[in-house]
């Protein structure tokens, strides 16, 4: 058996759970619109995270080039997927009874959400380095700009409660994710 296929199984399961959580959360909003009051910033972050999850699964194909798998490397990739899953759970909690809607919930959990988001983007850099310096260099300024800005903005979003800031950041992150996919990841390999 190919070692990479063995390694890929765990993070694929974790990502599948995350996608399932996002889709179930959106389905609940559609099924019960009066019970789950929509908040546009929350929905944009949900779209961002959905794109990030499927993009992560797509770009992790490059890990097949790793010649020597170690447990720490396997653990890191697994934890990277776990961070994404936890963000999905934070965006769509099991219960919303304590909140008037997703807006109130989002701002009450922003410290957790954006702490994990900061860690997510730092993990992205480590993951990219694992694939090699040449790969990192090939991504260039588009990748460096997106990742650096998202780390800074995520760290700021932990403290900032301003709706305009959060809306702008959500749109920026989602647009940049789409741009990265279009520029570097339209084909696999």
Image: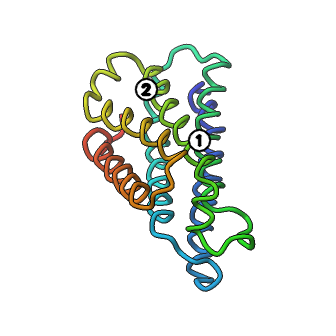
Horizontal and vertical percent position of residue 100: 65, 75
- Up-down relation of residue 29 to residue 110 (above or below): below
Nearer to us in this view, 65 or 112 = 112
Residue at the spot 60% in from the left edge and 39% down from the top edge: 81
Residue at the spot 42% in from the left edge and 42% down from the top edge: 153
Nearer to us in this view, 140 or 169 = 169
Q: Give the numbered dot on residue 70.
A: none
Q: Quadrant of residue 147?
A: top left
Of the 4 image quadrants, the one containing the C terminus is top left
Q: Give the numbered dot on residue 116.
A: 1
- Up-down relation of residue 159 to residue 121 (above or below): below
Residue at the spot 59% in from the left edge and 30% down from the top edge: 77
Which residue in the protein does label 2 denote?
A: 128
Nearer the viewer's eye, disc 2 or disc 1? 1
Residue at the spot 48% in from the left edge and 35% down from the top edge: 121
Kind of element beneath mark 2: helix
Q: Quadrant of residue 8?
A: top right
């Amino acid at each position: 058996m190919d070692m990479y296929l063995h390694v890929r199984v765990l993070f694929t399961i974790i990502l599948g759970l995350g996608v399932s959580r996002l889709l179930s959360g959106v389905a609940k909003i559609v099924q019960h619109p009066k019970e789950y009051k929509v908040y546009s910033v929350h929905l944009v972050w949900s779209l961002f995270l959905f794109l990030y999850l499927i993009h992560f699964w797509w770009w992790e194909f490059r890990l097949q080039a790793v010649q020597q798998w170690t447990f720490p490397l396997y653990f890191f990739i697994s934890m990277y997927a776990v961070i994404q899953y936890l963000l999905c759970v934070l965006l769509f909690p099991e219960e919303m009874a304590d909140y008037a809607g997703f807006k109130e919930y989002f701002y009450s959990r922003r410290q957790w959400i954006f702490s994990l988001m900061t860690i997510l983007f730092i993990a992205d850099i480590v993951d990219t380095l694992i694939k090699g310096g040449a790969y990192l260099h090939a991504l260039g300024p588009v990748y460096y700009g997106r990742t650096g800005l998202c780390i800074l903005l995520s760290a700021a979003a932990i403290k900032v409660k301003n709706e305009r800031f959060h809306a702008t950041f959500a749109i920026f992150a989602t647009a940049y994710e789409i741009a990265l996919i279009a520029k570097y990841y339209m084909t696999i390999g």
